[in-house]
Amino acid sequence: MGSQLRERVPPRVVDVCASCICDPVTRLKFLRLAKPAPPLPPEPPRRPPKRRRPAIALTVLAAALLMAPLGRVAPTEAPPPPPPVGPLEPPQDSPAPRVWLVEQSNGTEIYSNGLRIEGGPGVPGQPRLYRAFDRNAPDGSRWQWRAEPAGIVFHSSESDVASFEPEMNGILKRQGELLLAYARQRRCYHFLIDRFGRVHRVVEESARADHAGHSIWSDDDWVYVNLNHSFLGVCFEAQTQPGVAVSPAQIHSARVLTEMLRSRYNIPARNCITHAQVSVNPRNFRVGYHTDWARDFPFAQLGLPDNYLQPLPSLTFFGFDADASFVKLAGPDLRHAVSLAQAQVRHAAAGRGIPVARYRAELQEAYARAAAAATNPAGS
Amino acid sequence: MSSSEKKLDPRIGLDVGTSRIVMARRVDNEIEYRSQLNAFVRIPASPLTASVLRKEGIPHTIDGSDVVIYGDQAEKFANIFHVETRRPMQNGALNPSEPDGPAVIREIISLLIGDQKARPGEKMCVSMPGSPLGSSDDLTFHESVVRQIVTDFGYEVSTINEGLAVVYSDLAESNYTGIGVSCGGGMCNVCFAYLSVPVVSFSISQAGDFVDTNTATATGEVATRIRMFKEKDFSFNGASGDKIQRALTIYYDEVIRHLVTAMNCAFSDNRALPKLDRPVPVVLSGGSSIPRGFRERFEKALRQSAFPVPVSDVLLAADPLHSTAKGALVSLLAD
C-alpha cells in the first residue's frame, strides 16, 4: 500500500493527514507508510482528479486506521512487541541437538531426529586427511593434521529440474536417479537431497569428495584451504536462479541432516556455509568461481545463523577479491560480507602503511604456500 | 512500584558517538537514558589495584600487566594519573591508532545494556555518521565493526543516520520535515528530511574535539581539561579576558563557519531538494551545541549566508545529549 500512496498522493495531503495524529511514533509510522523511501521530486506529480480522489481517500483511511487506537489507549501507547520467533529460528551459535543412529538395515539408516539416509555406506574414496592452518599463520607455516570434517559446504546441482507438479512425477524421479548416478560416478558430494527430500549417501563420510575445488574458509581458530577433504559436501537437487525455490521436504531433510552431521562431528554452526562463499579462482584471484547459493540459502530454516554475514576469509587472509559480476549475483548479506572483508583489507594495509595492492600481493603469496601444503596431505 | 515491576521495552536506541555512547529505551512509557564516556585509560596493574577497583565497582578489564578503565571513570583516573584519556573513536569513526577501540566499545555497550544476551528477535537501532562532505573517507569499516559488536549481543541491528535521528527526536511537530544537526565530539552530522524521508545528509569532521584540541594547543592546557571546562563553564558572552574562554570562542566560531559553509555547499548543489511550501525548522543537538549562545551564533551565521532552504526557526533540541539515541529509538518504535 505504501508504494501506491507514494505514487498517487500529493505530499500536502500526507502532511495534513499526519498533522492529525497526536502520538509522534504513530505519526512517523504513518509517514513511513505513505512515504517510505525515496526523496520527493522537485514538483509533486499532477494527476487528474479522478485518479487523485481514491488515493487521497486511501491516505485518510490509513491515517484514520492509525489514529483509531488513540481513542482507546494512552497517546504514548507502546507499539506491539516484536513478533514471536518461530521454532525454526534458533539463537546464534546454538549447539547442535544430540542425534544418534537408531537403526540400520537394507542400506537405510534411521536417526533419532527423523533423518533417513538411503544408499548404504556410499562410494569409497580417498581417506580424509588434511591440514588445518593456524589462523595466526595462514601461510602454511603452522598447521595440524585432521581426519574429521570441520564443516559442511552446501551446493546446488544446477541440473535440469522439472516443475514440481504431480503430473511431472515420472520425470522428477528420472531426473533424480540420473543425477544420483552421475554424482556417485564422479564422487561429487557426500550427500544428495533429491526433489522429494530423500537423502542419498553418495561418497562415504570418511572419504574426500570432489565438491569444493579451489576453496577457502576459516573459523575462530583455523583456516581451511581446498575443502574437498576438510568439509562435507551436501547437495540440493535444485537450481538457485532467483525465483526457483527448493521444496519444503528438501529443507526439512537438510535440517535434520545438518543436525546429525553437526552432532556427530561437533561442527560449529559458522562452518556450515555455501559453495559460493568458499569458491575461488587462483588464476585471477577472484572469489565466486562457483556461485551456487550466492543468495537465498535458507540458513535460518536449517537451524543455522545467517552465515552469509561472515567476512570472506579468501579476501582477508589470501588477497582474493570480488568482481562486479559476483557482487551483482550475491544477495545483500553476502554483499555486505564482501564489503566488510574489503574494508578489513584496506584497514590492514593502512595499518602496515603499504598500498592495498602490495598488501594483497603478499597475501596471495601466502595463499600459494598454503595451497601447496593443503593439496599435499600425505606430505610431512 | 519497584524497579523489577517496571515494564521494560526490549527495543533499544544507541548513539555510538566519538565522545559518549548513549542508550535509550522505554520503561513504563517513559524514555530512560544511560550514557558513558567513550574513552579509556590504561594504568599499571597490581593485585591491590584490581582488588580496589573491583570493590569500588569501577568498570575495568585486566589486559596483561595493565588495567583498562573505561567509561565515565576513565576521566577521573586520567586526572589522578595526569594522563590523557584514550579514545576508541576519532572524527566520528573508529580510531585507527587504537587497536583496542572495538573491545572498549564492546565493554562500554555491555555496561549500558547489561551483559546478558538479547533474546531472539530483540532489536537495536544504532546511529551512524553520514558520508563526509568532500572527502573520500570510507565509513564501511566503522559501520561493519559496530554492527558486529551489537550483533554479538544477540540483537537484530538496524542503523540510522545521526542527523535523521535528530529529526526523529525533535521535529515531530513539523511532521519530521526539517534539518537535524548533531554537533558531537568528532563530527557534525546534518540531515534534511521531508516528511520523514531523508533527502540530503552529510557530515564534517570539525566538531567538539577540534575545538578542544586547538584550544589546548593555543593555551598550553590538556584537551581533557579544556573539555571539562567547556562543558561546565563556557558560554559565548562576548569579549572576555580569560585566555581559555577567548580561544574556545574563536575555535567554536571556526566550527560554525565551516558547518554553515558545508550546509550551503551541500544544499545548493542538490537537485533532489523538494519544492517547499513553507520554511523548515533547523534543530541543533549534541554536546557541542550546549554552550549558551551557540544557537544564536549559529542562527546568525546561517541567516547571513545565502542558505538556499527557507528556514523558520533554529532550535536547540529539548535534550541535546540524548536526542540521537532518542531518535534511533523512535525509528525502531515506528517500524
Image (cartoon, coloured by chain):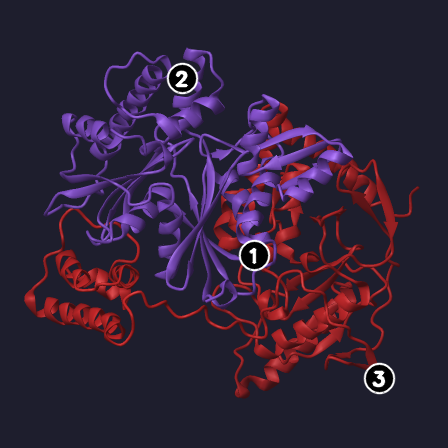
Chain designation of label 1: A
The residue carrying mark 3 is: A103
Residues tagged 2 and 3 counted as in contact (Cβ below 8 A): no
- In the rendered structure, the colour chosen for chain A is red
Dividing the picture into quadrants, the one containing residue A133 is top right
Q: Colour of chain B?
A: purple
Q: Which residue is mark 1?
A: A294
Q: Report whether mark 2 lies on the same chain as mark 1.
A: no
Residue at the image point whose x is 73% and y is 40% from the top = B51
Q: Amino acid at mark 1?
A: Ala
**Residue sitting farthest toward the bottom:** A167
Q: Position of residue B187 (x, y in %)?
A: 39, 32
Q: Identity of the amino acid at label 3?
A: Glu
For numbered disc 1, what is the local secondary structure?
A: loop
SS of the residue under disc 3 = strand
Residue B328, percent from left and from top: 39, 51
At x 47% / y 23%, what residue is drawn? B225
